[in-house]
Amino acid sequence: MQKIAKFIYSKLLGWKIVGNTNMSIDVIKKAVIIAVPHTSWHDFYIGVLLRKVIGIKTNFVGKKELFTWPFGYYFRAIGGVPLNRTKNENKVEAIAKAFEKHDEFRITFAPEGTRKKVEQWRTGFYYIAKVAKVPIIMMTLDFQNKQNRISEPFYPTDDIEADFRFMYNFYKGVVGKIPKYS
């Protein structure tokens, strides 16, 4: 399967991996991965192919309504975790606890929280990483250059403003599938 994924990813679609090419992500068994910019449904299959090419397991959360028939089985099989989005549940705590339940758990988020253009990211992924005491790994969805740039693991500090400046800088100039939403 990995050979087929590599063929589709690099030969048919023309994508490449840059940055953390030594794949230290492979030795990091627990992490929060952020994929930016999230501008299209196309981001999903690029991410699925990328993880197969790299050869790692990743997870994602989605609203629980996505995990019903006919797609529920598929989403769970590829690492999906349904999220109950009721207002009285602390989502950061609930997701951070998932790290305790697994020996290997890498969860991917689109910090924009939507496929539309946003001025600032949501902060949940950041606090999940802090509570779970795991690194953040940044990954680009750069459709202009057809590349996924992967950062070294980054451990959040107690200075959220400096940390977000650092992360925003990593994505500077990256253009998503729909440029006006980047």
Image: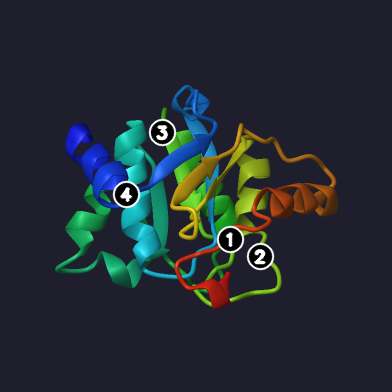
- Badge 2 element: loop
Mark linked to residue 102 = 3
Tell me if mark 1 has few (under 14), some (14-19) or many (20+) residues whose alpha carbon lies within 10 angstroms of its own.
Answer: many
Residue assigned mark 1: 111
Mark 2–mark 1 CB contact (< 8 Å): yes
Residue 157 placement (x, y as % from top left): 79, 39
Residue assigned mark 4: 48
The Cα–Cα distance between marks 4 and 1, rounded to whole angstroms, is 18 Å
Q: Residue at x 53, y 77 (%)?
A: 116
The Cα–Cα distance between marks 4 and 3, rounded to whole angstroms, is 20 Å
Report whether 155 appears left or right of 7.
Answer: right
Inspect the image, locate mark 4, and give the three-letter code of the amino acid beneath it. Val
Mark 4–mark 3 CB contact (< 8 Å): no
Residue assigned mark 2: 121
Inspect the image, locate mark 2, and give the three-letter code of the amino acid beneath it. Trp
Sequence-wise, which precedes: disc 2 or disc 1? 1
The Cα–Cα distance between marks 2 and 1, rounded to whole angstroms, is 5 Å
